[in-house]
């Protein structure tokens, strides 16, 4: 089983949105038995909390349920257990590279690499924004997830 971890700052906005969207799309594509996904944060600000209410609201309007997800912090075990660690922005990628062991460095990538047509390298943090910012995050996440699903189907992301 391919294991994918999404990472943002506090694991209450961007990364749980990506986790929820990917889970939904995996079910739709009949791939949920082949791919496991989880999300985490680089910081422990919200450990145990559900996703931000605004993220949940925006996701729900598009048919994604984030209500069962809970925030966690990235741990050393994540680098051992996951085949692909996707940073939601470049600051997360740098933070992950600082704490990952040498053998896990090649597993750390930017999520938006899977949506080159979106014209963004980072998924912006909506936390201090408004509803439009959460909608933008969903737009980018949906684009990235579609690219991720395509890469999985092409066999580009094999279990290590």
Image: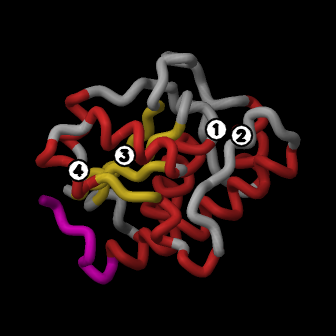
Q: Marks 4 and 2, how far apart in space?
A: 30 Å
Q: According to the image, label 3 marks what residue?
A: 5
Whether 25 is drawn above or below 68: the answer is below
Residue 140, position as x, y percentages in the image: 65, 63
Start and end of the magenta stretch? 153-160
Q: According to the image, label 4 marks what residue?
A: 105
Which label's residue is closer to the chain start, 2 or 1? 1
Q: Marks 3 and 1, how far apart in space?
A: 14 Å
Q: Mark 1: which secondary structure?
A: loop
- Residues at discs 2 and 1 in contact (Cβ within 8 Å): yes
Residue under the image location 16 percent in, 61 percent down: 159
Q: According to the image, label 2 marks what residue?
A: 55
- Residues at discs 4 and 3 in contact (Cβ within 8 Å): no
Q: Marks 2 and 1, how far apart in space?
A: 6 Å
Q: Marks 2 and 3, how far apart in space?
A: 18 Å
Q: According to the image, label 1 marks what residue?
A: 13
Query: Which marked residue is nearer to the observer: mark 4 or mark 1?
Result: 4
Which label's residue is closer to the chain start, 4 or 1? 1
Residue 157, position as x, y percentages in the image: 26, 69
Q: Which mark is residue 130?
A: none
């Amino acid at each position: 089983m391919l294991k994918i971890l999404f990472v943002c700052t506090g694991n209450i906005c961007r990364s749980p949105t990506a986790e929820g969207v990917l889970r939904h799309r995996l079910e739709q594509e009949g791939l949920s038995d082949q791919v496991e996904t989880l999300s985490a944060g680089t910081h422990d600000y919200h450990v145990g909390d559900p996703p931000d209410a605004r993220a949940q609201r925006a996701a729900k309007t598009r048919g994604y349920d984030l209500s069962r997800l809970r925030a966690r912090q990235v741990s050393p075990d994540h680098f051992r257990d996951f085949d692909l660690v996707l940073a939601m922005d470049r600051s997360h990628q740098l933070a992950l590279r600082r704490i990952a062991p040498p053998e896990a460095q090649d597993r750390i990538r930017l999520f938006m690499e899977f949506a080159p047509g979106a014209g963004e390298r980072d998924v912006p943090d909506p936390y201090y924004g408004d509803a439009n910012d959460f909608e933008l995050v969903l737009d980018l996440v949906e684009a990235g997830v579609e690219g991720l699903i395509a890469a999985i189907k092409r066999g580009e992301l094999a279990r290590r």
